[in-house]
Image (cartoon, rainbow, N blue to C red):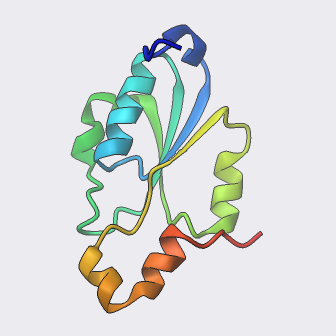
Amino acid sequence: MNGKLDRDALRDRRALITGGMGFLGSNLAIALVQCGAKVTLVDEMIAGYGGNLFNIAPIEDRVNINYGDIRDANMMNYLVRDQDYVFHLAGQVDHIMSLKDPFPDIDINIKEPPS
């Protein structure tokens, strides 16, 4: 691979992006939509975590948006079904909170969801 995005390989492929309204997720979503992928975003939109509808404004009408917590096993099992690609970019990013109370950080960023 030469480091270039293979647009033809992504055309009509289904992609799920967790944390899809954040900086990285939204930019990935824009690139995938430009390649012709069918993109689904999931984001809980927690204040201070970077999720913002403005980030996906150029493609808002071309993506499916789900507002939800990645720890919701039923929701995630439904959303990942039939996806060709899953990009997991969601996470707890508040460093101060992780020092004061590490358990939400562990729960969101490390633990495997229940089956």
Instruction: Work out which residue is located at the far bottom of the displayed protein and give it.
Output: 100
46 shown above or below 14: below
Front one among 109 and 51: 109
Residue 75 sits in quarter: bottom right
Vertical side of 6 occupied by 50: above or below: below
In this picture, is 45 found above or below 54? below
The spot of residue 45 in percent (x, y) is 35, 62
Q: In the rendered image, which quarter is residue 28 located in?
A: top left
Q: Residue at x 66, y 69 (%)?
A: 113
Left or right, residue 42 beside residue 28: right
Q: Nearer the viewer, residue 2 or 15?
A: 2
Residue sitting at x 37%, y 90%: 101
Residue lying at the far front of the rendered structure: 2
Q: Position of residue 4 (x, y in %)?
A: 43, 14
Identify the residue at image location x=27%, y=29%: 58
Farthest residue, direction top: 8
Q: Residue at x 30, y 55 (%)?
A: 51
How many numbered tags mark residues here? 0
Quarter holding the C terminus is bottom right
Q: Residue furthest right?
A: 115
Residue 36 versus residue 18 in the image, above or below: above
Left or right of 50, for residue 3: right
Image coords of residue 30 (percent x, y):
35, 29
Which quarter of the picture shows residue 85? top right
